[in-house]
Amino acid sequence: MMEFKACDRKLSFGGPPLVMGILNVTPDSFFDGGRFTDPEVALERALEMEAEGAGLIDVGGESTRPDSECVDEDEELRRVIPVLEKLSGRVRTPLSIDTRKVGVARRALEAGAVVVNDVGANRDDDAMGELIAETGAGYVVMHMRGTPQTMQRDPVYRDVVGEVSDFFDDRIHRLTRLGVSVDQIILDVGIGFGKTVHHNLELLSALRKFKKAERPLLIGVSRKSFIGRLLNAELDERLAGALACACWAALAGVDIIRAHDVIETLHAVKMIDEIRKVQSV
């Protein structure tokens, strides 16, 4: 059984995947932008996700959808810190901050977050790794080609599975060199971040290969555009496709599934686990 350490919290993996509930406090996120910007409304949604069974709650103040605009640090802090302060002490579920900015990550950890979910883990500097080593926070290392502003401009790979795997090996080496324990690291292949529809399918089909790193594996497929393209489905019609991906991920041994639809995702992966238990008897 794998352990994950995040500040004073510990999570163990080995059963059905945990569901990381998405709580965007942005005006422009592709699915729930503008719905939870008020801290009281955000608290209500966080408590609802906790009651539904979320194992983590991921708070984000900057949209990272393709072609999204950058948000400056002061604005991102203005969005996320009041929400984290409101949630801290009221929500028992571990809190994660979805940010690329070291300054935002530091303030968020001070406000009660214990995990940094970093889509910008492809950066060259060591500042975020140094913060993770200093604080003992959990760290989600996500693969992305480029930035949200550039990532979908003709992404090309010779071998997307091999290149993502090499990226993980490199990041784990760099982080441990900075003093981060491997127990603090989660890996995310970055579905939709600098990938074509076919790249996303290749990564999903090869999820078991990423387990060789012996770190918890996270995927985020919730209502993403590649599902819409494959199924000719609008945003509000993509839940079934996202749940199919979640079930596939559960069968492949993925440990965390990041989702807007918490209870639906949790029910889907629990059913997979119950079937698997009978199969193994």
Image (cartoon, helix red, strand yellow):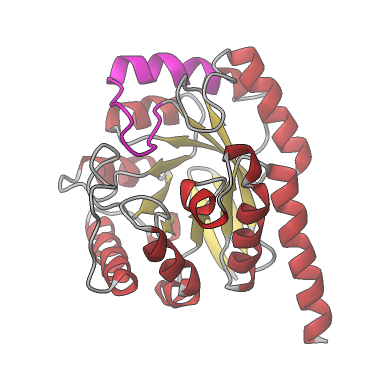
Let me know if residue 220 appears in the view. Answer: no
Which residue is painted at 30% across and 39% down in the image? 148
Q: Quadrant of the N terminus?
A: bottom right
* Vertical side of 38 occupied by 122: above or below: below
Q: Is residue 78 magenta?
A: yes
Asked whether 230 falls inside the magenta stretch, the response is: no
Quadrant of the image occupied by residue 71: top left
**Residue at left offset 31%, top offset 15%:** 74
The image shows residue 39 at horizontal and vertical percentages of 58, 14
- 124 w.r.t. 215: above or below: above
Spot occupied by residue 129 in the image (x, y as percentages of width and height): 27, 47
122 sits to left or right of 231:
left
Residue at the extreme front:
232
Q: How far from the left and from the top, in percent, is residue 66?
A: 35, 39
Q: As displayed, is residue 227 above or below residue 30?
A: below
Q: Quadrant of the C terminus?
A: bottom right
- Count of numbered badges drawn on the protein: 0
Q: Which residues are magenta?
A: 62-84
Residue occupying the point 42% across, 62% down = 200
Q: Nearer the viewer, residue 241 or 21?
A: 241
Front residue (pair 195, 44): 195
Q: For this view, does 89 lie left or right of residue 115?
A: right
**Residue 129 makes an appearance in the image:** yes
Of 7 and 234, the residue lying toward us: 234
Left or right side of 107 for 13: right
Q: Nearer the viewer, residue 130 or 99?
A: 99
Q: Looking at the image, which residue is at 59% across and 20% down? A: 35
Residue 90 percent across, percent down from the top left: 68, 24
Name, please, the residue furthest toward the left. 124
